Amino acid sequence: KVDTVGGKVGDSLRANLASVELNAELTRLRSDMEIGTPLSELLWGGVSSSELNQLLDKLEIKALKDRVKALGASDAETVTTKAVPTESKIVTKEVSAEDLSRLLSGRKEPIAISINAPEGKILEYSVALDETNLLIIRDSNLGKWWNDSSLPKYLHGAKEIIRNFPISGLDFDTELAAYLVNPGGRNLALDDLTERFLGVVNAEQEESLFSQFDGLGAISIMKLVPLLRKEISEREMSALMSDMEIPVLVELAEMESTGIGVDLDKLRELSGFFRNEVDRETSGAHKQAGREFNVGSPKQLQAILFDELNLPKTKKIKTGFTTDAESLDWLFAKTKHPILKHLLRIRETSKLLTTVDGLIDATANDGRIHTIFQQTVTATGRLSSTNPNLQNIPVRTEEGRKIRDCFVSKAPYTTLLTADYSQIEMRIMAHLSKDPGLIEAFKSGEDLHTTSASLVFGVKPTEVDAELRRQIKAISYGLAYGMGAYGLSQSLDIEVGAAQKLMDEYFKRFGGVRDYLANVVEVARKLGYTETIMGRRRYLPDLMHDNRQRREVAERMALNAPIQGSAADIIKLAMLNVQSELVKGGFTSRLLLQVHDELILEVIDKEVDAVTELVRREMGNAFPLKAPLNVGIGVGKNWNVAAH
Ligand code: DCT
Ligand code: MG
């Protein structure tokens, strides 16, 4: 047969006949194998949704879950491994708000509540009395029971509700609990927890305007609480949950609801100023380029800088050469080309403009900004805030600080008070490492960075200038963040060898720090988690990862988590203590914000001295560190003036 194939192809075929036959044999699908398992056992038997969901959660595969959901809906029931009371066992009753109030009056056993309140307006809600009895209330009013502190309440994501409807007796929050159990994880939505812990897929629980509110969330919460309580207690975080995180949640809700006053006219004026700057600098850049172009487009910028103006090339990136602020800075230092000055100024001012416009948008009708604190987001335990993000309000430049001028006290309040911890991370480092030199440096009352610099660089304290102080800060914090000699050389802009020498010198002075840092990673590897001074845990399974890069990232997290997390613990404790003392003393002044290591209060004139004293005391005594906490306090009409 092979002879019938002609031409070059035929020649080549005949020359390689052996490999052609071998390939044919290799690629043949054999149907005569002994497989040892009857075919009937290989039949598709449906999905074990609880096991699969646990696996997908563990692998952090979220997208597949929804697709599997659709697949498994019909088959799942037959093979679900966990015995879960199905929906049919739930007894649902619709009652009026009045009936509910009557029913709950005098009750001491906990209830779980799920509220349908898009945009802060209650449409309907449900109350689970236990794991099977569900009441649905189609009313926008809650009842007296909501403020009955002797009726324990379970919610999921309570802060969002109670910022509008202040509560008493909040006993447990399933979202907060799931976060504490694993602060590095995601998927804290009630549906996710329901799947993960109960193995139930609540088919279509998306609450759109069109779907009926079925209230089943309350049943899920009721069932989740004992499971999450157990997880938390096994991790020895019960006190952290009930004495810190829950009260913090309640306090944050109140602060969100209070908000901070802004001077809207001033903000608009600033916005106009920055817009002007951007416009002027943009025409300046166009003039230098000899034509108009979009200054915000990296692609067009590359064309102008590197093709048309023939400036030296910056670092190569996937899409050409980088035009980030740092490289424009470098390029300007090198070439002094005036277009770069315009471009850098545009970068600076358009960022400020965006911030200011964001603040204007976020200002509510009451002339205040009600930021949303995020309590369940960071892996370390620190708070953050959104809409607007107040950690982004610049503080380093004169123009940036003008934005802080717009945050003001409003009548009857006369004053903003800001109080922040100084060098809290290094104090925690001293406490955790018990390094005698570092503790002594704090106790001596001298400036820590000056003292360390004089020790490490071998100069007199009086010879430590701003530059040396900056360098020692980079070393101290760099080490706490797991930076090696290479990282340090980058941040100080010196040779790696010189950086290594500095590190050696540092560790010679502060050997306790070196031992602590080495130990913390090893302990974390053994236990699987790190711990803060209040027992807040961060689980780091990657410490055992085969991939070196993954492992090293986890190691840096292990170094940093106890320090950042303890700082979070301390500022939360301080916030709670300040608040309870304000209440106890019958003060009118109130807490507004917690940003980084800073608390911001709104104070009435005649309370300024007493509140200053109160805040200094409560923040200073929040936790007995071996290197005592240091609090800086300032007061003034606005956030900028109150800075210190
Ligand atoms: N920080 C850092 N790396 C640096 C400098 C600072 O990670 N090189 C972090 C940790 C502390 C925080 O920022 C606040 O910075 P500073 O106020 O500059 O630090 P400080 O220790 O409070 O020093 P100072 O006494 O100058 O305020
Ligand atoms: Mg500081």
Image (cartoon, grey):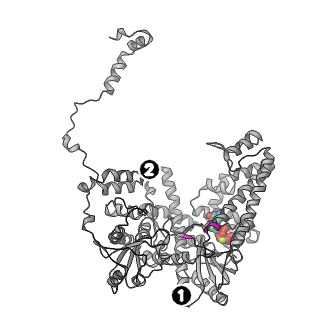
In which quadrant of the rendered image does the C terminus lie? bottom right
Q: Is mark 1 within 8 Å of ligand 2?
A: no
Q: Is residue 368 a member of the stretch shown in magenta?
A: yes
Q: Quadrant of the N terminus?
A: top left
Secondary element at image label 1: helix
| Amino acid type, label 1 | Val
Viewer-proximal residue among 63 and 488: 63
Is 6 positioned to the left or the right of 580 in the image?
left
Look at the image and tell me whether residue 248 can be seen: yes
Residue 58: within the magenta? Answer: no
Graded by Cα atoms within 10 Å as few (under 14), some (14 to 19) or many (20 or more), the crowding at tag 2 reads: few
Taking the spot 76% from the left edge, 46% from the top edge, the residue there is: 292
Measuring from the top left, give residue 105's x and y in whole percent: 34, 86
**Image quadrant in which you'd find residue 590:** bottom right
Residue at screen point 21% across, 34% down: 34
Q: Nearer the viewer, residue 560 or 284?
A: 284
Expressed as whole percent of the image width and height from the top left, the position of residue 329 reads: 74, 52
Residue 624 visible, this orientation: no
Q: Would you name the residue on which mark 1 appears?
A: 583
Who comes first in sequence, dot 2 or dot 1?
Answer: 2
Q: In the image, is 274 to the left or to the right of 434?
A: right
Element type at marker 2?
A: loop
In whole angstroms, how far apart are the C-alphas of marks 2 and 1? 53 Å
| First to last magenta residue range | 360-372
- In this orientation, which residue lies closer to the viewer: 273 or 149? 273
Name the quadrant containing residue 115: bottom left
**Residue 573 place in picture, x, y as percent:** 52, 78
Indicate which disc residue 546 carries.
2
Q: Quadrant of ligand 2?
A: bottom right
Residue 538 at what x, y percent from top left?
Answer: 46, 65
Count of picture labels: 2
